[in-house]
Image (tube, rainbow, N blue to C red):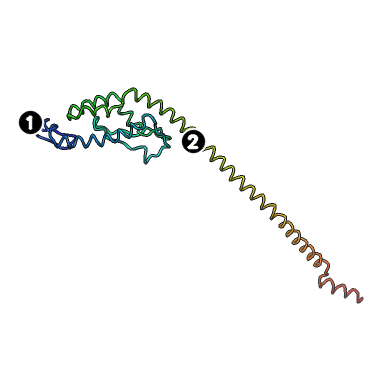
Amino acid sequence: MGAFYCAICKQTDFSGKGHIYGKSHQSKLKVVLVKFLDKVKEARRTLKCPQVEKFDASQHETKFWCYCCEVEVQKHVTDGRVAVLYGGLLEHMSTQEHRKNTNAFWWKNKADHKHKEKFIITEQETDRFKEEVAKALEQYEEKEDTLIKQQAALIRSQEQHRLEVLQALIEVCVPGMKQHLIQNCSSLLNRSSRTSSRRPAWVQSRWEVFTVY
């Protein structure tokens, strides 16, 4: 028999395709499907109530591996500003390509058919999800607008408070400053007047000389 590579077991087997019926393969297949199904269940919870969040590259650019299609897919949907959680996963699982690959995966690995539909999103579910996403986006925008208005109002309130404090300081301090300036000016004027009334020594000596004659 020819060599057979098993993507589930990640090994090359020389027993042919009979490998997929073995206990080892079926055991690893169950582990893979359980992990995959956990992600699908998380995504399905958002079908009726989509979650929209502000975009965060560290959280919303993650990807997941689709075992049925053997391809890496974007987990969330984002436009760089907001993100629809699990939108990418749900969108991928609703495609005809994914359905086709899922059927092939189940047949190839002899998986339990009663679980297959859990890994496929129907057209009706997709349409309902899109409607709910539109509502969720609208609600998100309304909340953002409200938050922006609240922040603007807070900034205006803080600015008004600073102006009031500044005005109060001016009213208290400026009169005292004026009085202080007036006193200083008066003192300078008095000092200048006394200084200007005195004759210089050389003028006085000359005056005395003229007086003698």
- x and y, in percent, of residue 199 in the image: 83, 69
Q: Kindly identify the residue that appears in the image at 61 percent across and 48 percent down.
A: 162
Q: Can you name the residue that lies furthest to the left here?
A: 1
Circle count: 2
Tag 1 or tag 2, which sits nearer the N-term? 1
* Labels 2 and 1 touching (C-beta < 8 A): no
- x and y, in percent, of residue 56 in the image: 40, 39
| Residue type at tag 1 | Met
Q: Quadrant of residue 211?
A: bottom right
On the rendered image, what quadrant is the C terminus found in? bottom right
Say which of 180 and 147 sits in front.
Answer: 147
SS at mark 2 in the image: helix
SS at mark 1 in the image: loop
Q: Residues within 10 Å of mark 1 (few under 14, many from 20)?
A: few
Say which of 152 and 49 sits in front.
Answer: 49
Instruction: State left or right for residue 45 relative to residue 69.
Output: right
Location of mark 1 (residue): 1
- x and y, in percent, of residue 38 in the image: 28, 36
| Residue type at tag 2 | Glu
Q: Kindly identify the residue that appears in the image at 67 percent across and 49 percent down.
A: 167
Number of the label disc, if any, that sits on residue 32? none
Location of mark 2 (residue): 144
Say which of 190 and 133 sits in front.
Answer: 133
